[in-house]
Image (tube, grey):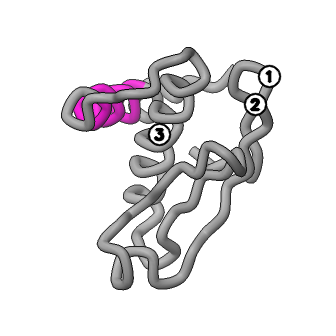
Amino acid sequence: MPIPLQVNIAGIDYTVHYQEGLLKTHSLMGQVIYAESKIDIDASMSKSKKEQVFIHELVHAMLNEAGYDEQDEEMVNRLSIVLYQVLKQNDLKF
């Protein structure tokens, strides 16, 4: 699954950026910066890990745009892992 450089969530265009050192410097594989409509992904990871992290951050952004300001990280993590597997194994592209 190619990661898009931009994704629209509830009418908001989020841009996707690859960051060098995000994992080493901040111990983050990815992050969403809501005020900038930006998803950052650490550039050093494997392709499949980048995809999985993208889905994780996408779920955060979707919940934020749906009005969920407080999010349970464990729930987001579990949902994003299963969503990534379903999308990938079923080759779901619309």
| Residue 80 spot, x, y in % from top left | 35, 33
Q: Main secondary structure of the magenta part?
A: helix
Residue beneath disc 3: 55
| Residue at screen point 46% across, 20% down | 68
Residue beneath disc 1: 11
| Residue 51 spot, x, y in % from top left | 47, 50
Residue type at the position of mark 2: Asn
Nearer-N-terminus badge (2/3): 2
Q: Which residues are magenta?
A: 76-86
- Kindly state the secondary structure of the residue where label 3 is placed: helix
Label 1 – label 2 distance at C-alpha: 6 Å
Q: Give the class, few, some or many, for how many residues have Cα within 10 Å of label 1's Cα (few <14, many ≥20).
A: few
Q: Seen in the image, is 41 located left or right of residue 86?
A: right
- Kindly state the secondary structure of the residue where label 2 is placed: strand
| Residue at screen point 75% across, 31% down | 8
Label 2 – label 3 distance at C-alpha: 14 Å
Decide: is 10 above or below 61.
above
Disc 1 + disc 2, Cβ < 8 Å: yes
| Residue at screen point 26% across, 37% down | 73
Q: Seen in the image, is 20 located left or right of residue 79?
A: right
Disc 1 + disc 3, Cβ < 8 Å: no
Q: Give the class, few, some or many, for how many residues have Cα within 10 Å of label 3's Cα (few <14, many ≥20).
A: many
Q: Which mark is residue 8?
A: 2
